[in-house]
Image (tube, rainbow, N blue to C red):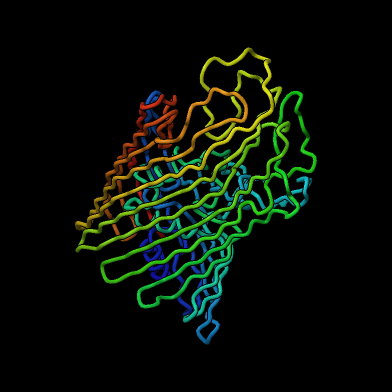
Amino acid sequence: MKKSLVALATLAVATGAMAQSGMARSASGSNVEIFGVFDATVTRLSADGAGSVIRMQGEGRNESSRLGLRGTEDMGGGWAAGFWLEAGMFVESGGFQNTTSNNTAYGQTGISTSASNAAASPDVVSLGAMQGLTFNRASTVSLINSQIGELRLGRDYTPTFWNKTLFDPFGTVGVGAYTNLTYGTLNKYVAVAPPGNPTPQVRASNSLGWLSQNMNGFRIQVQHALSEQLSGCTDVQVADAGANADNGGNLCQSAAGSGKYTGFRLTYVDGPLTLAAAQGKTDYPYPMGSASRGVVTGYQGGYKDANFAAAYQLGNTRLLGQYGIQNFGSTNTNYASGINASVAPAAPGAVWTGTPAATGSTYANGILSTSERTLKTTMLGITHAMGPWTLKGSYGTAKVAGGQLSASTSRNLANFEDGSKSKQIALGAVYDLSKRTALYGTYSKLTTTGQNTTASMGVASAAAVGLGGSNTATGLDLGVRHRF
């Protein structure tokens, strides 16, 4: 039993230290296994204007900390059934990570069961690691066929995320992670209320997927996640103030179709060469209500993510590269009369310049629009094995195009996102004490430049900078990782 646990833990690491692989599993054998990774780090983070801090990080900075159960049942005739439950955890506190009930902006607050949100499904967790065990990393049941592939239902990784993590020398964890750029401060959908981002940029709840077996080096993954929002929902819930206070009426938290996700991934392996391409699309329809209802919060517009990745194994050296395009749809946000003029509307990316009018002044109703914007990212990486040592390095960039602001009534606006950019350089080393235990260290420096931008790597720069200015954040991880 002990040997089989070690073998399976090693297999999981070989597929990118992730949850279940983005490939179909074998239809042979029957078993149930317990597995996991415990990874704890002493991390130093700093950012311009914010100072520095030293923290113990237990979520995993070399491999994600987790506790899991998985199993298969051989049903004969080339068919098998399988399940995979995987919980992310914080080793430093013993707490477990959160999950979301759906893929909308309100994924932590439940599923609406009436047009007015009078009731919500209880399958939701939002207690900030005090909720107990949740299988947030993976929770699926599968039917597997040796020829057809695997049909997988439940909460699973999105096809586009597999490329981001499998072709990153740092596996999208720790201060060197490529996701510091792809999901960093230039990503419009990254800044949401705790316990985290419910959009399916990493995982999708309520998903149905098909993963093919190997077809002459090619493999295919297709995934669709359900919206679970009522078709009769035609307006979104808003929060107003003063004379425009509104109790919601028949408004919904999320519009019909919100959170629906569709994605695919194609991979090709030929000896030392691996190629991969993936694309995903999430719907966030935004039915406008009357302007008197004030500022609408939550995601607006659609979200598309596409990426291309390649890797080449040259002896003990592995060369990796990625290119990604994320598209955030144009948005329209209401602002209303009666809003205190000294407070800017909470619109995505809104920047107000000039001297605000006196407190208590009113503006006419209107619409604040943000044009479609695109975030393009690149990454070049390398790993080199040398005895018990593995050396790592990467260089990545991110740049925004679009995101200009306009208003339907006279306003003094400054463009927020267009032209903002980030770059990151990361270096690291892993020293294997045994097949299951390792010491590691990673250093990373991230610089962000542009209008009203910040640099963040767990600690954000204290103030946004003006046009052409820049902020820098740095991080250092020193930790130990143990698999079982």
The picture places residue 105, in percent across and down from the top left corner, at 61, 45
Identity of the residue drawn at 54% across and 48% down: 97
Question: In the depicted view, which residue is nearer to us: 65 or 204?
Answer: 204
> Residue 430 at what x, y percent from top left?
28, 51
Residue 417 percent location from the top left of the image: 45, 35
Q: Which of the 4 image quadrants contains residue 358?
A: top right
Residue at 40% x, 35% y is 420
**Quadrant for the N terminus in the image:** bottom left
- Is 247 in front, or is 300? 300
Q: Which residue is pictured at 40% across the width and 75% down the height?
A: 214
Question: Going by the image, does 74 lie left or right of 284?
Answer: left
Question: In the picture shown, does residue 82 fall above or below 119?
Answer: below
The quadrant in which the C terminus is found is bottom left
Image position of 17 with respect to 463: above or below: below
Q: Position of residue 478 (x, y in %)?
A: 32, 42
Q: Count the numbered circles shown.
A: 0
Residue appearing at x 48%, y 46% in the figure = 90
Q: Is residue 359 above or below residue 41?
A: above
Residue that sits furthest to the top in the current view: 358
